[in-house]
């Protein structure tokens, strides 16, 4: 029997204050789950693999806004550039430049977030706060007219310790405020703080998230 996608979605939405948007993370879940959420009015979905996104984009309603949330290899950018709504996990200037190039070919501007690496866990991905500062201070991004940096994205450590999770969200929020004041004070589109997943999105919302990325709580456990 199908997971109660509609009921779960309603519950998550009921927990979100005004102004916080939900990205329903549908990776590894079948189209019928996405369609159930769509019927409830959900329009923003997040995927982390290019091929899976390609298939879903081709077979699901065209007004879905697809966010790419995973690590994106530069050689895959061209496949999603025609239709992706936001690329959330930009963690290098090289990737940013490739997105700009492919967006230019499509004669469009692609919204992106810079991915921070704050969690203690070892991962190859994401910019440390200092690397994020460095990328922005370097200034080359200013010449990229086909990408629009709309904010920051991060994943907190996967732990039970609420204090630790909160402190990581706060580091991200402080960096957001710093970057906003330094580079984007006059850019109303720089406003997104994408943090909060199934296990920590209520905390994330308390700590200033504007966009939560929730999968398991809505669609159930992923079958890999
Ligand atoms: C899978 C994933 C999520 C959703 O995780 P859940 O625990 O299923 O809510 C959020 N963000 C990123 C970057 C992910 O890869």
Image (cartoon, rainbow, N blue to C red):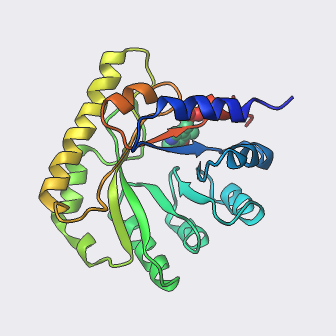
Split into quadrants, the picture shows ligand 1 in the one at top right
Rendered view: 58 above or below 161 = below
Rendered view: 160 above or below 44 = above
Residue 83 image position (x, y, % from top left)? 59, 70
User: Which of 104/73 is in front?
Assistant: 104
In the figure, is residue 102 to the left or right of 184?
right
| Residue at image coords 63%, 35% | 9
User: Which of 215/135 is in front?
Assistant: 215
In the figure, is residue 151 to the left or right of 22?
left
| Residue at image coords 74%, 34% | 223
User: Which of 214/175 is in front?
Assistant: 214
| Residue at image coords 82%, 32% | 2
Residue found at the very far right of the displayed protein: 1
User: Which of 124/93 is in front?
Assistant: 93
Residue 164 image position (x, y, % from top left)? 31, 20
Residue 87 image position (x, y, % from top left)? 47, 59
Residue 40 image position (x, y, % from top left)? 68, 44
Residue 120 shows up from this direction: no
Q: In what quadrant of the picture does the C terminus appear?
A: top right
């Amino acid at each position: 029997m199908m997971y109660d996608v509609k009921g779960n979605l309603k519950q998550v939405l009921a927990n979100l204050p005004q102004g916080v948007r939900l990205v329903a993370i549908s990776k590894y879940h079948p189209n019928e789950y996405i369609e159930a959420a769509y019927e409830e009015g959900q329009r923003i979905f997040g995927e982390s693999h290019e091929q899976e996104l390609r298939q879903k984009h081709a077979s699901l309603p065209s007004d879905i806004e697809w966010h790419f949330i995973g690590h994106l290899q530069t050689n895959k950018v061209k496949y999603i550039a025609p239709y992706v709504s936001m690329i959330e996990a930009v963690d290098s200037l090289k990737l940013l430049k490739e997105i700009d190039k492919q967006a230019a070919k499509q004669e469009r501007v692609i919204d992106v977030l810079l991915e921070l690496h704050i969690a203690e866990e070892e991962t190859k991905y994401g910019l440390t706060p200092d690397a994020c500062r460095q990328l922005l201070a370097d200034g080359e991004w200013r010449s990229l007219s086909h990408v629009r940096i709309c904010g920051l994205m991060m994943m907190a450590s996967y732990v039970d310790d609420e204090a630790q999770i909160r402190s990581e969200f706060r580091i991200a929020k402080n960096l957001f405020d710093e970057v906003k004041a330094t580079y984007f004070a006059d850019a109303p589109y720089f406003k997104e703080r994408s943090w909060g997943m199934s296990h920590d999105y209520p905390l994330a919302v308390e700590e200033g998230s504007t966009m939560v990325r929730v999968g398991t709580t809505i669609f159930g456990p992923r079958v890999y």
